């Protein structure tokens, strides 16, 4: 079961980190636009489109990654005082009542929305450059599917926690533990040398 959870976590992490590179595209395109607009007095016709397309793609594809890291905003004033079993029970109910129906609606509506956009090869209406926006809209059902997979992993975690009374490890917990173990080994390797002294 842990392998299943880590596989979905790894998939969400890989997708999130891959799309995070769009921040470079966004930064470079906005910087270029600022330069040509204010220095050369020759603004582009595509800068606005590129900025919202790249930012939108990053935002969409980071959802599953953030969920895998338990990083979404939570009002945990009361939540943190509960036992893990109570937390898991509440989370499970919320996933079933709200998360799954919302993601199902996102996938269904997003598929129809994206299909129409791709069929017509939709371009932006905000500039004469004709920047294609259908690739961004095609990401909507993909986002829904990735969130659905990560949601299944989170539901599985809730069920395991209800059974065992403790939360199962997340992928980043394992990564942090591995980093801690590696640091400890490095420190242990350095300590015998320092005990011998410089002349040893």
Image: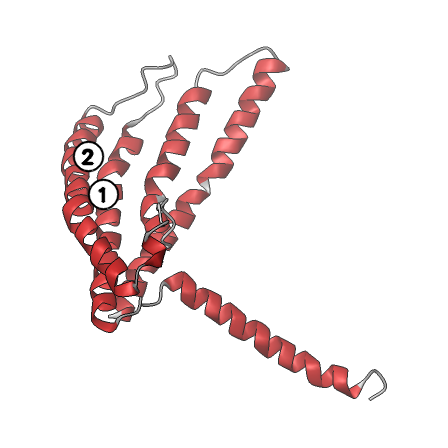
In percent of width and height, residue 99 lies at 20, 45
Dot 2 corresponds to which residue? Answer: 110
Q: Name the N-terminal-most of marks 1 and 2.
A: 2
In percent of width and height, residue 83 lies at 30, 63
Where 156 sits versus 97, above or below?
below
In percent of width and height, residue 142 lies at 24, 43
Dot 1 corresponds to which residue? Answer: 144
User: Left or right: where does residue 193 sit relative to residue 132?
Assistant: right
Task: Indicate the colouring scheme.
Answer: secondary structure
Identify the residue at horizontal 38%, vertical 50% (top origin).
Answer: 71
Could you say whether the residue bearing mark 1 is in a helix, strand or loop?
helix
Q: How many marks?
A: 2
| Residue 160 seen anywhere in this rendered image of the structure | yes
Q: Nearer the viewer, residue 149 or 14?
A: 149
Screen quadrant of the N terminus? bottom left
Q: Nearer the viewer, residue 6 or 77?
A: 77
Q: Quadrant of residue 199?
A: bottom right
Q: Quadrant of residue 45?
A: top left
User: Left or right: where does residue 19 sit relative to residue 88?
Assistant: right
Identify the residue at horizontal 25%, vertical 67% (top origin).
Answer: 161
Crowd rating for badge 2 (residues with CA inside 10 Å; few <14, some 14–19, many 20+): many
Could you say whether the residue bearing mark 2 is in a helix, strand or loop?
helix
Q: Nearer the viewer, residue 197 or 44?
A: 197
In percent of width and height, residue 179 lies at 52, 68
Identify the residue at horizontal 53%, vertical 70% (top origin).
Answer: 180
């Amino acid at each position: 079961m842990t392998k299943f959870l880590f596989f979905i976590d790894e998939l969400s992490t890989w997708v999130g980190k891959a799309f995070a590179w769009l921040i470079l595209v966004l930064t470079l395109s906005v910087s270029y636009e600022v330069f040509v607009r204010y220095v050369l007095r020759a603004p582009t016709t595509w800068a606005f489109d590129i900025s919202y397309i790249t930012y939108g793609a990053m935002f969409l594809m980071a959802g599953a990654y953030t969920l895998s890291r338990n990083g979404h905003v939570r009002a945990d004033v009361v939540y943190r005082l509960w036992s893990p079993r109570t937390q898991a029970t509440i989370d499970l109910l919320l996933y079933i009542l709200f998360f799954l129906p919302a993601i199902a609606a996102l996938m269904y509506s997003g598929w129809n929305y994206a299909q129409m956009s791709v069929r017509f090869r939709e371009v932006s209406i905000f500039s004469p450059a004709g920047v294609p926006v259908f690739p961004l809209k095609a990401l909507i059902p993909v986002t829904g599917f990735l969130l659905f997979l990560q949601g299944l992993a989170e539901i599985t975690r809730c069920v395991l926690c209800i059974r065992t009374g403790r939360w199962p490890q997340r992928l980043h917990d394992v990564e942090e533990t591995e980093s801690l173990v590696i640091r400890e080994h490095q420190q242990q390797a350095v300590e015998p040398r320092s005990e011998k002294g410089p002349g040893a």
